[in-house]
Image (spheres, rainbow, N blue to C red):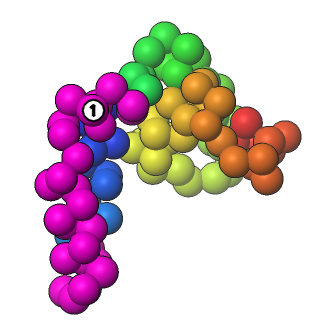
């Protein structure tokens, strides 16, 4: 869960200074942390199994994948949070 929060925060901090970044910053401060954390699925055993499959398939296909990205993708896939266009691909 904290990795997801880190990724969201990094995304905000990487935006150029301006109205959009400031609005996202304010929005992030307004959401109670316990409410946000309760909506982020954990990296559990099911996600770990998906992670193993995704990384092994990616390596076999010769694709370079970042570990953090694969961790978050596996949590999303394990919790049925993937967008429909991604179904049926190596990501699913």
Residue 33: x and y, percent? 18, 37
Residue positioned 27% across, 68% down in the render: 24
- Quadrant into which the N terminus falls: top left
Count of residue discs: 1
Please, what secondary structure does the residue beneath circle 1 have? helix
Whether 19 is drawn above or below 91: the answer is below
Residue farthest to the right? 88
Query: In the image, is residue 32 part of the stretch drawn in magenta?
Result: yes
Query: Is any part of residue 59 visible from this angle?
Result: yes
Q: Is residue 86 left or right of residue 76?
A: right
Residue 48: x and y, percent? 50, 19
Which residue is more in the foreground, 39 or 84? 39
Which residue is more in the foreground, 23 or 3? 23
Query: In the image, is residue 50 part of the stretch drawn in magenta?
Result: no
- Quadrant into which the C terminus falls: top right
Q: Residues within 10 Å of mark 1 (few under 14, many from 20)?
A: few
Residue 35: x and y, percent? 27, 32
Q: Which residues are magenta?
A: 14-40
Instruction: Place residue 37 in its image quadrant.
Output: top left
Residue 11: x and y, percent? 31, 65
Please give the residue where the numbered disc 1 appears in the rendered image.
Answer: 35
Please identify the dominant SS of the magenta region.
Answer: helix
Whether 43 is drawn above or below 76: the answer is above
């Amino acid at each position: 869960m904290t990795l997801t929060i880190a990724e969201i925060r990094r995304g905000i901090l990487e935006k150029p200074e301006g109205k959009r970044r400031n609005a996202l910053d304010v929005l992030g401060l307004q959401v109670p942390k316990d409410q946000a954390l309760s909506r982020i699925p954990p990296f559990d055993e099911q996600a770990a199994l998906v992670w193993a499959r995704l990384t092994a398939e990616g390596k076999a296909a010769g694709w370079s994948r970042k570990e953090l990205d694969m961790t978050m993708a596996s949590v999303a896939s394990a919790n049925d949070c993937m967008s429909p266009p991604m179904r049926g691909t190596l990501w699913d």
